[in-house]
Image (cartoon, rainbow, N blue to C red):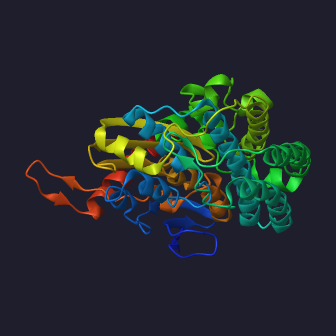
């Protein structure tokens, strides 16, 4: 008797999804036999708005691309703008920036641990991790004035300096999180229930990861040693020997599943603590802005023509910005690629053949941000006809199917 396939639509509004996206799955029994992932529900036109403002306004608009990792886009923006405009941030600012960025990485990874625990029904772990996350948010609020959307970076430096009281709070947090990560290893990585729900689930091979061009912890969990801080170091990262965290360095092999990505993120928290400690202990003296006031900076931007590509290793993976300046006080071209734009491509192959109960884990696996990755794309034929979104989506699905067939044989 032939099996009956059932159609399960998930999203764009669903309790397991914190942002709008649609996953359409066909299942036979509990097994997923076909899946399509549809995005495009959260486009806000931020790039277009940024090209209508001056560079300082666009910098703080970039912070709104993602609320959780809200330092990541400003970091990539200022690094790119400085390349394009020929501005170099003072050494002290180049050390303060990684401190803020790594504090944010700690809070983002702990938040992710709580979210994936929640998706598998482990709410005690959710509450415990989010309680631990409060400490780093308190420190960020002390340093910048905000728990989220810090508005602390500036083209040519940072807006706020570190005082002795700030450094003491940072060192106290470092001590706290060394103990907290040891507890996470014991409570999470050694927990038989967590291990049973994550080992072999959302398993991404190194071959598939390379074909899909995934980035960040998703790539590193598959054993790919890639990290912008390691491969193209910037600011104080150039003075630190940052080595990408991969499972084979911890347990000898990389399986690329949800357990491995949990392990990578926990060990990356420890790596962030080392980076913060180094930057605090070696913080140079001096000014924090290359150009001391906004009118002078805008005048410099109006006098300069240039373009550049810059990147920052965000908690979810590499954030890439492209900026072009042509004599206006703001960018004439601004393009952004966020890590979720790459990583969401892994959902279809990971879900194919999985159990229905594993859908929330697969979705949470990459730590997705829909607002980060949504773009409007227009394709034209050689005759100039604009192809609609349906055609574009069809081609994307065809490409995914081809990759699935190649890898799964």
Q: Residue at x 35, y 49 (%)?
A: 334
Please tell me how many numbered marks the rendered image carries: 0
Task: Name the spot of residue 368 as percent of width and height, x first.
Answer: 57, 57
Camera-nearest residue between 109 and 281 = 281
Task: Name the spot of residue 69 as percent of width and height, x first.
Answer: 61, 54
- State whether residue 278 is above or below residue 61: above
Task: Name the spot of residue 11 as percent of width and height, x first.
Answer: 52, 72
Q: Is residue 156 left or right of residue 205?
A: left
- State whether residue 194 is above or below residue 120: above
- State whether residue 1 is above or below residue 13: above
Residue 409 appears anywhere in the view: no
Quarter holding the N terminus is bottom right
- State whether residue 324 is above or below residue 36: above
Q: Residue at x 72, y 32 (%)?
A: 283
Camera-nearest residue between 326 and 221 = 326
Camera-nearest residue between 50 and 189 = 50
Task: Name the spot of residue 390 as percent of width and height, x first.
Answer: 29, 64
Residue 124 appears anywhere in the view: yes
Which of the 4 quarters of the picture holds residue 324?
top left
Which of the 4 quarters of the picture holds residue 138?
bottom right
Camera-nearest residue between 102 and 398 = 102
């Amino acid at each position: 008797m032939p099996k009956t396939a059932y159609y399960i639509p998930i999203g764009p509004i669903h309790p397991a999804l914190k942002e709008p996206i649609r996953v359409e799955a066909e299942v036979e029994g509990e097994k997923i036999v076909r899946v399509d992932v549809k995005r495009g529900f959260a486009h806000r036109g931020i790039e277009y708005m940024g090209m209508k403002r001056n560079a300082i306004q666009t910098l703080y608009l970039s912070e709104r691309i993602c609320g959780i990792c809200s330092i990541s886009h400003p970091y990539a923006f200022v690094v790119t703008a400085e390349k394009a405009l020929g501005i170099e941030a003072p050494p002290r600012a180049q050390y303060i920036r990684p401190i803020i960025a790594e504090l944010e990485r700690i809070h983002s990874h702990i938040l992710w641990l709580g979210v994936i625990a929640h998706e598998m029904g482990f709410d005690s772990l959710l509450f415990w991790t989010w309680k631990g996350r409060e400490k780093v948010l308190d420190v960020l609020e002390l340093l910048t004035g905000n728990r989220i959307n810090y508005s602390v970076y500036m083209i040519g430096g940072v807006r706020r300096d570190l005082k002795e009281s700030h450094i003491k709070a940072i060192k106290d947090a470092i001590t706290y999180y060394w103990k907290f990560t040891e507890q996470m290893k014991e409570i999470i990585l050694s927990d038989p229930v967590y291990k049973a729900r994550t080992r072999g689930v959302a398993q991404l091979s190194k071959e598939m990861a390379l074909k899909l061009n995934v980035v960040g912890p998703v790539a590193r969990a598959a054993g790919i040693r890639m990290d912008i801080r390691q491969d193209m170091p910037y600011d104080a990262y150039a003075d630190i020997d940052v080595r990408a965290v991969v499972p084979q360095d911890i347990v000898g092999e990389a399986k690329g599943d949800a357990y491995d990505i949990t392990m990578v993120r926990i060990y990356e928290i420890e790596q962030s603590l080392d980076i913060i400690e180094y930057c605090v202990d070696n913080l140079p003296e001096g000014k924090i802005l290359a150009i001391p006031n906004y009118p002078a900076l805008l005048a410099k931007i109006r006098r300069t023509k240039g373009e550049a590509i810059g990147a920052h290793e965000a908690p979810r993976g590499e954030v890439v910005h492209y900026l072009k300046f042509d004599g206006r006080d703001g960018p004439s071209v601004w393009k952004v690629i966020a890590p979720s734009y790459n990583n969401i491509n892994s959902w279809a192959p990971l879900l194919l053949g999985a159990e229905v109960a594993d859908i929330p884990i697969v979705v949470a696996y990459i730590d997705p941000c829909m607002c980060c990755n949504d773009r409007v794309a227009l394709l034209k034929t050689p005759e100039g006809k604009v192809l609609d979104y349906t055609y574009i989506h069809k081609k994307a699905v065809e490409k995914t199917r081809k990759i699935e067939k190649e890898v799964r044989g």
